[in-house]
Image: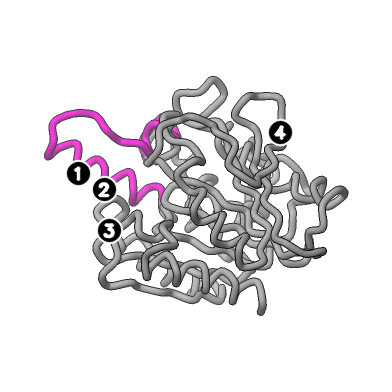
Amino acid sequence: MSLTTNTVPHQAIRIPYGDDENQFGDLRLPEGEGPFPVAIVIHGGFWRAKFNLDHINPLADALTAQGVATWTIEYRRVGHEGGAWPGTFIDSALATNYVRTLADTYPIDLNRVVTIGHSAGGHLAVWLAGRNNLPTDSVLRTSDLSLTLKGVVSLAGVSDLALMHDVHQIRETINGFHDNPTYDLLNGTPIERPDRYNEGSPIKLLPCGVRLCVIHGSLDINVPIGISDHFVQAARSAGDAVDYMILPTAEHFQLIDPDTEAGLQVVQSTIRLLQE
């Protein structure tokens, strides 16, 4: 995973959606006239400042090569001024809604927009679909006119923040030092910050109301596949349509490497979702 360099990739147009240096996105357009379907690509790194969008560039490139416009978003993260709660969530919402502004200039189809995120980015990708279910007084409500999504692709997404917190807490006990990214994101435990866990966790905002595509590798040691198992069951019980793809030989990072079989399946699944 890349450290923060914020290098503008080849053939991408870097566009700010806010005033902070981390409030920008990289727009890639396929060849042709369009209008093109859009994938809002959200990187992971457990919401931490030292990890940026560079490491998900190959996935964005692969999608764009298949005719999908990609809007790879950056956002304030833990360690940045204004990052963590609530800024990380607000930035992802602002960047997503900004696709409407992009459509004023670029040939993109607002009726065919999906979010696709990996790990912590998978958390945000699903959260963006469920944010319409936030309490009316939530600090995370940035607009009553959220961009309508056609679907969501979660790649080993952290869809249950309380469960992920507990996983890291177990690891902390074993390792003997603090390393709990979920605690750092929300500045507390589920007991200390129940409102934040309820408003920030996708599993608490079901039903999303759009088709969900959840992909997880059985060999993942970063985000246990049980988190996706639990989420998929809850989403289906809430009435959401969910395609669940378990990749028995894939680990965490293969999902965003289009040169692997797992990465190829991710690209194909995203295209199918946009074509439905």
Q: Quadrant of the C terminus?
A: bottom right
Q: Tell which circle, 1 or 4, labels the residue nearer the N-terminal end.
A: 4
Residue on which disc 2 sits: 167
Mark 3 to mark 4: distance in Å?
33 Å
**Residue 1 point in image, percent of width and height:** 37, 42
Mark 1 to mark 3: distance in Å?
17 Å
Residue 162 vs 246, above or below: the answer is above
Residue on which disc 1 sits: 170
The dot on residue 96 is: none
Mark nearer the viewer, 3 or 4 = 4
The question of residue 110 being in magenta is answered with no
- The secondary structure that dominates the magenta segment is helix
Element carrying mark 2: helix
Mark nearer the viewer, 3 or 2 = 3
Element carrying mark 1: helix
Mark 2 to mark 1: distance in Å?
5 Å
Question: Pointers 2 and 1 in contact (CB under 8 A)?
Answer: yes
Q: Amino acid at mark 2?
A: Val
Residue on which disc 3 sits: 220
Out of 61 and 105, give the one closest to the viewer: 61
| Magenta-colored span | 161-189
Mark 1 to mark 4: distance in Å?
39 Å
